[in-house]
Amino acid sequence: MIAALAGGVGAARFLAGLVRVVPPDDVTAIVNTADDDEFVGLYVSPDIDSVTYTLAGASDAVQGWGRAGESFRTLDALGRFGEPTWFRLGDLDLATHLARTRRLHAGEALSAVTAQLAASWGIATRIVPMSDDPVRTRLTVTGADGQLLELAMQEWFVRERCEPPVQGVHFAGAAAARPAPGVLEALDAADTICICPSNPVISIGPILAVPGIRRALEERRERVVAISPIIGGKPVKGPADRLMRGLGIDVSAVGVASEYASVCGTLVIDALDAHLAPAVEALGVRCVVTDTLMRSPEVAADLARRTLAAVA
Ligand code: GDP
Ligand code: CA
């Protein structure tokens, strides 16, 4: 059995490779929900949707999020009414948010709804939100006038295009959140726990902030293997560099290792960063060097195979 801590796009690519090398129903993905938010009254869970659409083979291959063949006619129509349209919700994607929101309003838990939607796609892998309780990433940033202000994750990431410099991050609600049903059980039963190549600050950080999850990894540290999302001092995509720098974390595989050192015994880094292996190992983290840029599902499968072998 394998458990994987997962954010959105980077995680989804890795998981798509993983399920090519192990039976898909051996895998439980524990997914970040701290990016979740409401738009036009609908509950949107971006990382769960990235993982679900990718494992369904239904995601947009170029951008890596949202659905293939998407259109935005409904959003355009909403814009006419003066509704905010900065968060891009596609016509097909809206069906997910409508179904999810209705079921949540009917009293179902996010974990139950997530499982139902994944089953509708025929996905054998278990996709589990980190928690059914609300946890929200809040970023303290410097505004245009130099004042500090607090933004929700999507406000900073999408609306403000990651421009305001980040001074701090916190996960509102985390202290009171409980792991969703199945999370601790999956971590306990796993032969291997993967930390996907996801944003360490705002994808993996919130999962580890749910009480009980960090300790579960610490207790099984020798079975935990992470893949660095930073290659050659840069994220493959997304704002991990801005966030890491803002929090004083070195933007490198070594910075990733220092973030994960207490929870993970092994870090997989890219061949481009081979010279950093001694610095990673100096932190007490075993280092494995391989090709980690997932150009295709085949490369992702090779990466998954090497990742599992690293702790076999
Ligand atoms: P998000 O919520 O959609 O931003 O998704 P994640 O947190 O899962 O993924 C973002 C991280 O994935 C970024 O830091 C990227 O550097 C990393 N990432 C994306 N593609 C790849 C890849 O092919 N290889 C590696 N090593 N990291 C990747
Ligand atoms: Ca995300």
Image (cartoon, helix red, strand yellow):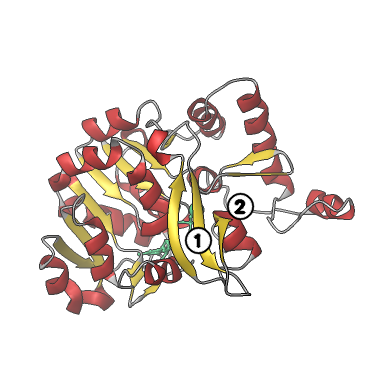
Mark 1 or mark 2, which is nearer to you? 1
Q: Position of residue 246 (x, y in %)?
A: 41, 70
Q: Position of residue 14 (x, y in %)?
A: 38, 54
Q: Which of 27 and 112 is in front in this view?
A: 112
From this viewpoint, is residue 26 visible? yes
Disc 2 crowd, CA 10 A, few/some/many (<14, 14-19, 20+): many
The structure residue drawn at horizontal position 46% and vertical position 39%, both measured from the top left corner, is: 173
From this viewpoint, is residue 198 visible? no
The structure residue drawn at horizontal position 37% and vertical position 32%, both measured from the top left corner, is: 179
For the residue labelled by badge 2, is the local secondary structure a helix, a strand or a loop?
Answer: loop
The structure residue drawn at horizontal position 79% and vertical position 52%, both measured from the top left corner, is: 75
Q: Would you say the residues marked 1 and 2 are in contact, meaning their CB atoms lie under 8 Å apart? A: no
Q: Which of 122 and 159 is in front in this view?
A: 159
> Who comes first in sequence, dot 1 or dot 2?
2
- 240 on left or right of 100: left
Identify the residue under disc 2: 66
Identify the residue under disc 1: 140
Which amino acid, by three-letter code, is at mark 1? Answer: Thr
Which amino acid, by three-letter code, is at mark 2? Answer: Gly
The structure residue drawn at horizontal position 50% and vertical position 61%, both measured from the top left corner, is: 140
Ligand 1's quadrant: bottom left
Q: Position of residue 31 (x, y in %)?
A: 42, 42
Inter-mark Cα distance, 1 to 2: 27 Å
